[in-house]
Image (cartoon, helix red, strand yellow):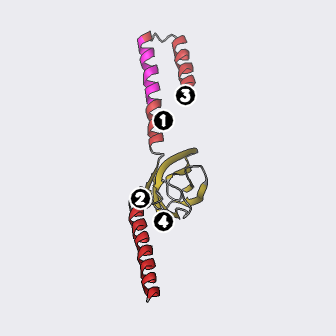
Amino acid sequence: MDMDDFMKCYFLTNRSGNNMNIFSSLFLVVVFTVTLSFSNSFAQESQTITLATDKASYLPGDTVELKGTISGQPGQLVAIQVKDLTGNLIIIRTIQTDQNGNFVLQFKIPTTATSGEFNIVASAKINGSVVTQTNAITATVPEFGPVVPVVLVISILSIILLSFKTRVLTTF
């Protein structure tokens, strides 16, 4: 029974001579509205997708293991999209949950990836409604950092030593 049916029923009862006062009428309307709110919120709570990855940060070429669950939905189709920071599509797959509502997907971070976030979006149609969950992981391209000066010094010293050795050998 929706609110319109409830109101029609109330007005029909009131016209037939039943003397309900305004407070009892208001009380019934509030109880009916609260009941509808609770039933809708419980229905929406059960329609969730959870996502988790084996790590938070990856290097280019690493394999990501994405695990997820759709509560109470065995055999459910799940659409997975992974995009890089600039919105380029990395992977798009449709997978099916197992008998417990779980799913697993493995994919590689491209070797050409730049540092930044990768957005993972999982969507499924559950009880006629599309439910979506997002997750983000980070790809980090390693930089040489403090190693560069050391390598540079060793390279220069090696060149100097080799040139000195070559001069010594050519003079004899």
CA separation, marks 2 and 3?
A: 66 Å
CA separation, marks 2 and 1?
A: 54 Å
Give me the disc on residue 145: 2
Residue 90 location (% of width, % of height): 58, 58
Nearer mark to the viewer, of 2 and 1: 2
Residue at the disc numbered 3: 2
Nearer mark to the viewer, of 4 and 3: 4
- Specify the quadrant that holds the C terminus: bottom left
Magenta-tinted stretch: 23-35
CA separation, marks 4 and 2?
A: 25 Å
What's the residue at 44%, 39% (across, down)?
Answer: 42
Tell me which secondary structure the magenta stretch mostly adopts. Answer: helix
Q: State which tag comes first along the sequence, 2 or 3.
A: 3
Residue at the disc numbered 1: 40
Nearer mark to the viewer, of 1 and 3: 1
Q: Quadrant of residue 3?
A: top right
Label 4 element class: strand
Label 2 element class: loop
What amino acid type should be assigned to the residue bearing mark 3?
Answer: Asp
Residue lying at the far bottom of the rendered structure: 172
Tag 2: Cα neighbours inside 10 Å, few (<14), some, or many (≥20)? few
Residue at the disc numbered 4: 63
Query: In this rendering, would 65 be left or right of 113?
Result: left
